[in-house]
Amino acid sequence: MVRPPSTHPIRVAIVAPSIGILGGQAVQADRLLRAWQNDPDVHAWLVPVNPAPARLIRAAVRIKYLRTVVTQMTYWPLLLRELRHADVVHVFSASYFSFLLAPLPAVLIARLYGKPVVMNYRSGEAPDHLQRSAIARLVLARVDANAVPSRFLRDVFARFDIRAEVIPNIVDLDRFAFRRRTPLKPSVVSTRNFEDLYNVGCTMRAFHTLQQRYPEATLTLVGGGSREASLRALAHSLGLRNVTFAGRVKPDDVWRYYADADIYLQTPNIDNMPASVLEAFASGCAVVSTNAGGIPAILTHGTHGLLVNCNDHEAAACEMIRLLEDPALAERLTTAARESCERYRWQNVKTQWLALYNSLARTAALPATTAA
């Protein structure tokens, strides 16, 4: 006898950093959770990889290595409580040590309960991580599905014989509203955190060259991180003017910085599918970026923006000057970039996630829906 299909929404536990950690994973997880709110097909909730510990041990999180122990002591019991209620476990994943601390426990607990897992791997460091880590390769090869936000990562996975499908990031085209800039002004913004892989120092050197041509040029740096002190020192040593360190900005407010700028500049050495580029596209900023990792998968040089080689600040400056001196080029690029954002609307991305969730939930239910 076959049981009738369930009529309740698919219950999806999203294992990811909370928005208290201002990073790409947290922002995309938050957007996904908001998008699923009040949806008749999916009931999704967050299982944070950075849960707040009990009050009695909360002070321990201020101590570097003890913080990891305390977080794990809180995280594993949370997984045990929450994943048992899910039909599908959706795990956000980065690379290296964080892979062992956050995604791996979620996969193990999901397996304990017999829950299907979709691994949503998002790190531009995948080529090196998968080469180095047999554990990561084994886990990714054995989860029920892998979803990655770019064809760059899909191709990296394929090199290790791991299957993955591309489900892109979400962009809120209402919040990041398009504005034409005719002509462009030398008003530059960067929204990458101050860590080595994002190479914000290259951004500042490119701006230095730009400011020699356009003394009135401005640069706003949105973000924070371990390299902030050295970047401030670099600004001083280069004699930069009109540079604003805006600090970390809540995701709900970052649109204002794109709206106020005309050029979006980023110069990472390692990257995947940065939502910041899509946000700049949606806002109407002309984009200049390095060609790191998966960026060329969303930004075709000469079509949606301009690409330069990694760590080439002179080329980045030249491309900004080119945009400022060729209004027709800037207009063509920004128009095409905005049009490309349609594929990242929630209505389009939703159908891909829903199809995957349905497939996993249906497959997991098969043994229980057939009786001898």
Image (cartoon, rainbow, N blue to C red):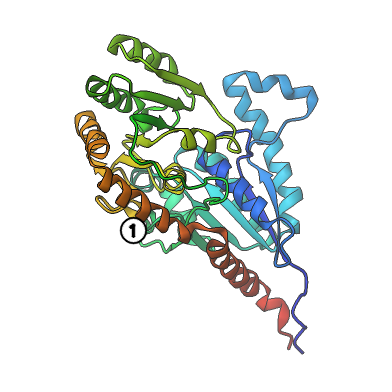
Which quadrant of the rendered structure holds the N terminus? bottom right
Residue at 58% over, 41% down: 26
How many labels were placed on the picture? 1
Compared to residue 280, the image places residue 341 above or below, namely below
Let me know if residue 294 appears in the view: no
Amino acid on which disc 1 is placed: Asp
The percent coordinates of residue 79 (x first, y second) are 70, 47
Instruction: Return the residue nearer the eye: 311 or 91.
Output: 311
Q: Which image quadrant for residue 238?
A: top left
Q: Badge 1: few (under 14), some or many (20 or more) residues near its Cα, within 10 Å?
A: some
The percent coordinates of residue 274 (x first, y second) are 42, 44
Instruction: Return the residue nearer the eye: 6 or 179.
Output: 179
The percent coordinates of residue 145 (x first, y second) are 52, 63
Residue at 68% over, 74% down: 365
Q: Is residue 235 left or right of residue 97?
A: left
Instruction: Return the residue nearer the eye: 370 or 346.
Output: 346
Q: Is residue 353 left or right of residue 337?
A: right
Q: Which image quadrant for residue 89?
A: bottom right
Q: Secondary structure at mark 1?
A: helix
The residue that disc 1 covers is 155
Compared to residue 357, the image places residue 283 above or below, namely above
Instruction: Return the residue nearer the eye: 200 or 286.
Output: 286
Q: Is residue 247 left or right of residue 315?
A: right
Compared to residue 372, the image places residue 112 above or below, namely above
Which quadrant of the rendered structure holds the C terminus? bottom right
